[in-house]
Image (cartoon, grey):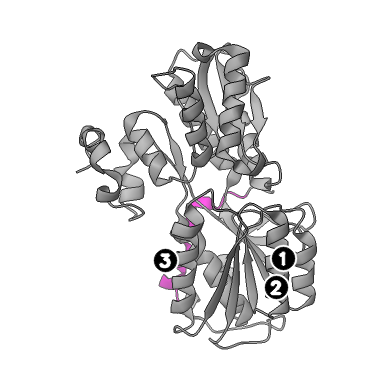
C-alpha cells in the first residue's frame, strides 16, 4: 500500500466539498458508467461476526446513506461471511448471478477473493473494497491509513510503559489474521515504533481469523515462555483479541494488567479501558468510512464521475493493481481520558450505554456523567 498523507483532509472531505458545490455537481466524462436511476441494488459483503462493528455500525450506516442518496429507492443485499472465505466467495457469486448493480466488499481473504472480483468486473459490476484492500480489479477503496493505526497503537503503548521503557522490556505481539492485508500493515506500523525500544522477538503471533480464543492461547503460550511477571505489555491488533489477552492474563493470576492495546473501539473495550484492564483502543470513525463507501457505490453506478473522483483523491497499490482510487480516513487513540471526546462526542455510544451498573464508579472517576 502506498501511504498518502491525506488522512486529515479525508475525514472532512464531504463537508469541504459540499461547501464549494462539488457534491451537487452532475457532470460526467466520456468514461462514465452508464447512468442508472435510484432503483439500484447494492451488495454489501462483510467478513465476520467476531467484530461487532460490522453489524452495529458499518452496515446500518451504509444502508441509511444509500437510502438517503436514492430517495429510499435503493436496495441493500447484506451478507456476512462469518470468517469463512469460501462462504464469502459463494455470497459474492450469488450477487453476481443476481446482477446487483455494485458490490461493497470487506474481504475475509484478500487474495482468495480476487477471482470473484474479476468475475464481477467481467459482468459489469463495480467493486468497492471496504476496510481491507482486496486483490483483483477493484474500482476504489475506502479505509484508514493502516500503518498509521499500528503506529498510534505502538506509540500509545510506549507511553503506557512510561519513561523507563527499556530494550529488555518484553512486549507480546498478538497480530491480526495472515489472510488480512491490513494486519500486515498494522504490524509494520507498530514495529516502526517498537523496534529498538522493546523486545518482541519470539513473542509475536499472527492470529488466524482474528480469533479471540486463539489470541488467548497465544498469550498463554507466551506466559509459559517468559513468565507472567515478565510481560511488560501486550500489543493486541484489535479489541476482540484484547479480550482474549485479558482472559489469559487473568487465568495466569495477573491482577494488575500491563498496557494492552486494541482497535475498533468496541463497547466492551471502552469499558475495559475504564477499569484499567485495557490501556487503549484505536477509534476509527465508522460513519465517515461507511458513508464514503455508500457514496462511492451510488455515484459509481449512477455515472456521477465528478462526485466519485472527489471522494477518491488518494491512491493505493494492491499486489495485483496500481493507483487504485482511494479515501483514507483519520484515526485517533482512545485512552481513559479521551473517551468523552471521541466515541461519546461522536455519538458512537451514549454514556448510559458505557456506564452500566458495573462501571458506575469507574465512569465517575473518569468524569463520564
**From the viewer's perspective, is residue 324 above or below residue 173?**
below
Quadrant hosting residue 131: bottom right
Residue toward you, 326 or 200 = 200
Q: Which residue is mark 1?
A: 90
Would you say 116 lies left or right of 308 here? right
Looking at the rendered structure, which numbered label has been put on residue 15? 3
Residue located farthest toward the front when viewing the structure as drawn: 251
Count residues near mark 2 (Cα–Cα under 10 Å), then give few for <14, some for 14-19, many for 20+.
few
Look at the image and give the residue range highlighted in magenta.
Answer: 4-21
Q: Residues within 10 Å of mark 1 (few under 14, many from 20)?
A: few
Q: In the rendered structure, which disc, 1 or 3, sits on the residue that comes first in sequence?
A: 3
Q: Would residue 92 be counted in the magenta stretch? A: no
Mark pair 1, 3: CA separation: 38 Å
Q: Is residue 356 above or below residue 302?
A: above
Asked which quadrant contains residue 174, the reply is top right
Tell me the quarter of the picture where residue 307 sits: bottom right
Residue 115 in sight from this viewpoint: yes
Q: CA distance from mark 2 to mark 3?
A: 36 Å
In this rendered view, identify the residue nearer to me: 10 or 199: 199
Would residue 8 be counted in the magenta stretch? Answer: yes
Residue 248 image position (x, y, % from top left): 51, 26
Q: Are marks 1 and 2 in contact (CB under 8 Å)?
A: yes
Whole-percent x, y for residue 106 in the image = 62, 58
Looking at the picture, does residue 194 appear above or below residue 170?
below
**What residue is pinned by disc 2?**
94
Amino acid at each position: 500500500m502506498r501511504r498518502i498523507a491525506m488522512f486529515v483532509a479525508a475525514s472532512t472531505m464531504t463537508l469541504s466539498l459540499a461547501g464549494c458545490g462539488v457534491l451537487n455537481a452532475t457532470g460526467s466524462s466520456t468514461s462514465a458508467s452508464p447512468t442508472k436511476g435510484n432503483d439500484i441494488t447494492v451488495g454489501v459483503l462483510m467478513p465476520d461476526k467476531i467484530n461487532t462493528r460490522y453489524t452495529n455500525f458499518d452496515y446500518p450506516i451504509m444502508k441509511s446513506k444509500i437510502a438517503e442518496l436514492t430517495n429510499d429507492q435503493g436496495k441493500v443485499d447484506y451478507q456476512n461471511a462469518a470468517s469463512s472465505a469460501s462462504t464469502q466467495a459463494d455470497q459474492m457469486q450469488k450477487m453476481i448471478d443476481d446482477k446487483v448493480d455494485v458490490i461493497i466488499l470487506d474481504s475475509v481473504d484478500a487474495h482468495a477473493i480476487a477471482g470473484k472480483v474479476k468475475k464481477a468486473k467481467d459482468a459489469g459490476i463495480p467493486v468497492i473494497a471496504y476496510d481491507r484492500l482486496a486483490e483483483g480489479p477493484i474500482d476504489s477503496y475506502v479505509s484508514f491509513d493502516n500503518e498509521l493505526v499500528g503506529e498510534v497503537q505502538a506509540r500509545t503503548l510506549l507511553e503506557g510503559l512510561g519513561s523507563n521503557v527499556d530494550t529488555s522490556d518484553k512486549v507480546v505481539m498478538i497480530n491480526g489474521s495472515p489472510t488480512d492485508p491490513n494486519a500486515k500493515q498494522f504490524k509494520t506500523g507498530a514495529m516502526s515504533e517498537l523496534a529498538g525500544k522493546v523486545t518482541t522477538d519470539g513473542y509475536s503471533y499472527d492470529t488466524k481469523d482474528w480469533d479471540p480464543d486463539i489470541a488467548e492461547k497465544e498469550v498463554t503460550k507466551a506466559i509459559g515462555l517468559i513468565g507472567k511477571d515478565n510481560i511488560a505489555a501486550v500489543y493486541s491488533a484489535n479489541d476482540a483479541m484484547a479480550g482474549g489477552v485479558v482472559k489469559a492474563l487473568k487465568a495466569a493470576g495477573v491482577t494488575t494488567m500491563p498496557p494492552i492495546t486494541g482497535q475498533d473501539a468496541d463497547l466492551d473495550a471502552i469499558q475495559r479501558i475504564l477499569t484499567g484492564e485495557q490501556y487503549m483502543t484505536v477509534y476509527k470513525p465508522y460513519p465517515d468510512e461507511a458513508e464514503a463507501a455508500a457514496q462511492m457505490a451510488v455515484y459509481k453506478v449512477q455515472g456521477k464521475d465528478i462526485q466519485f473522483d472527489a471522494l477518491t483523491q488518494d491512491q493505493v497499490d494492491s499486489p495485483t493493481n496500481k493507483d487504485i482510487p482511494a479515501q483514507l480516513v483519520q484515526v485517533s487513540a482512545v485512552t481513559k481520558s479521551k473517551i468523552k471526546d471521541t466515541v461519546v462526542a461522536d455519538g458512537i455510544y451514549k454514556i448510559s450505554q458505557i456506564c452500566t451498573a458495573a462501571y458506575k464508579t469507574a465512569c465517575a472517576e473518569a468524569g463520564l456523567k
